[in-house]
Amino acid sequence: MFKQILVLSEVANRRTQHKVLGKCTEELGEIATIINKPRKIHAEAIEFEVADLIVAATDLVYVHYKKKGVDLTIDQINTMLTDAVAKKNGKWAGQLQQKGLI
């Protein structure tokens, strides 16, 4: 999943970390609006807004490392993100296990 996003990140027009971070914030705000105003008709369902946030956050990782001058391939960034998500999910699973929920 990340790799498909990163391929587009590589060919997208130049953008700054701040611009991409702003996009992440915008998408999170749209998610908040869906949750906080459930009676309002929204342009997109929450799953599409979450998808937009994932795309923007993935692009942010790409732009961050390029800005720092770290020469990573798409495959390396994909692996980094996949491993990070697995690690964070494992941490959450451990917390749930401690609470006896799994």
Image (cartoon, rainbow, N blue to C red):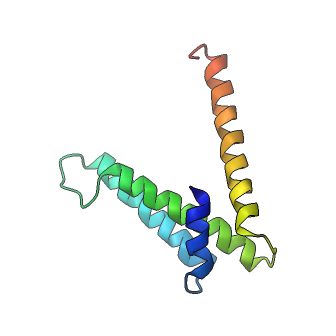
Which residue ends up furthest to the bottom in the rendered image?
14
In front here: 34 or 90? 90
Whether 92 is drawn above or below 12: the answer is above
Which residue is painted at 40% across and 59% down in the image? 29
Seen at 60% across and 13% down, the residue is 100
Residue that protrudes farthest toward the right in the picture: 70
Left or right, 76 with respect to 11, comes to right
Picture quarter with the N terminus = bottom right
Q: Quadrant of residue 92?
A: top right
Q: Nearer the viewer, residue 5 or 23?
A: 5
Left or right of 26, for residue 61: right
Name the image quarter holding the C terminus.
Answer: top right
Specify the quadrant of the image occupied by residue 15: bottom right
Q: Nearer the viewer, residue 13 or 25?
A: 13
Residue drawn at point x = 68 percent, y = 59 percent = 78
Q: Viewed as shown, does residue 15 lie left or right of 52?
A: right
Percent across and percent down for residue 56 are: 52, 65
x and y percentages locating residue 68 in the rendered image: 78, 76
* Residue 9 against residue 27 in the figure, above or below: below
Residue 97 x, y percent position in the rendering:
64, 19
Q: Name the residue at 56% across, 69% down.
A: 21
User: Which of the 4 image quarters holds residue 28?
Assistant: bottom left
Q: How many marks?
A: 0
